Image: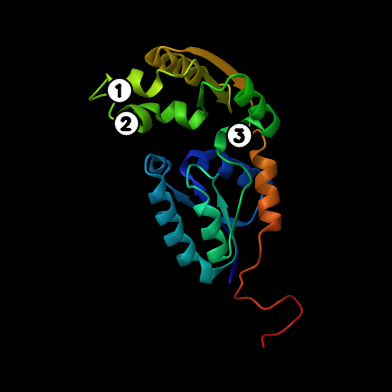
Amino acid sequence: MKGTALVICGALGSDVKEIVDRRGWEVDIFGVSALLHLYPSRILDELREKLLRLRPDYERLVVVYGECGMNEKLDALLVEVGATRIKGPHCYEMYAGAERFATIANEQPATFFLTDWLVRNFDRAVVKGLGLDRDPELIPMLFGNYEAVLYLRQSRHPRTAAKAAEIARYLGLTLEIEDVGMGELETRLAEAIQKAPLSPTLPPAGGGGR
């Protein structure tokens, strides 16, 4: 049986892989398309299929997802298959950090968040994913209650800053940028890997099977 498998959201994929490579962790990574966020119930279906398939082969399973609109069904699934997940409700809170995100939510609740991944994939995930290219009249319906765009930036690349500004103009909102780097993603991931439970099929350490 192998050691640890990470089942990760595609929106966190490049950052998780960078952390894993830099830290030299011996883990295997399996991705789930970030575009499934348009259909949260399908995230659960995909995760269940992957986790059940991986369960016999790995001692530990770690899901790198927030709650992400799954109505607490994700945590029930993790109990079912003997897996754990990284702490946090969603990636925006992970990148901003719990304290900073709570402040934003309290002081600027009408904020639309961007990350590096969403900036790079906005046209595919939001414009085409929500059909805004076909029905632009949906833009004020879906984004009319937002007051600003906050780009939680992982890397200082001029192209992503320019694209974020373009997105804000497209939505008719002002843009703010905060350089957060990995935020709390790396520390939470390390904690999740360290505390991941062993497969329930394994006997306790130092003991044999009954």
Give the residue pinned by disc 3.
93
> Element at badge 3?
helix
Q: CA distance from mark 3 to mark 1?
A: 27 Å
Residue ID at (48%, 39%): 11
At label 2, the amino acid type is: Leu
Distance of label 2 from label 3 (alpha carbons): 23 Å
Label 1 sits on residue: 138
- Does the CB distance between marks 2 and 1 fall below 8 Å? yes
- Rendered image quadrant of residue 49: bottom left
Tag 3–tag 1 contact (CB < 8 Å): no
The residue mark sitting in front, 3 or 1, is 1
Q: Position of residue 132 (x, y in %)?
A: 29, 25
Residue 101 placement (x, y as % from top left): 64, 29
In the drawing, what numbered circle is on residue 77?
A: none
Question: 34 or 80, which is in the foreground?
Answer: 80
Q: Is residue 86 above or below residue 161?
A: below
- Determine whether 46 is above or below 140 in the image: below
Is 72 placed left or right of 107 in the picture?
Answer: left
Q: Quadrant of residue 133?
A: top left
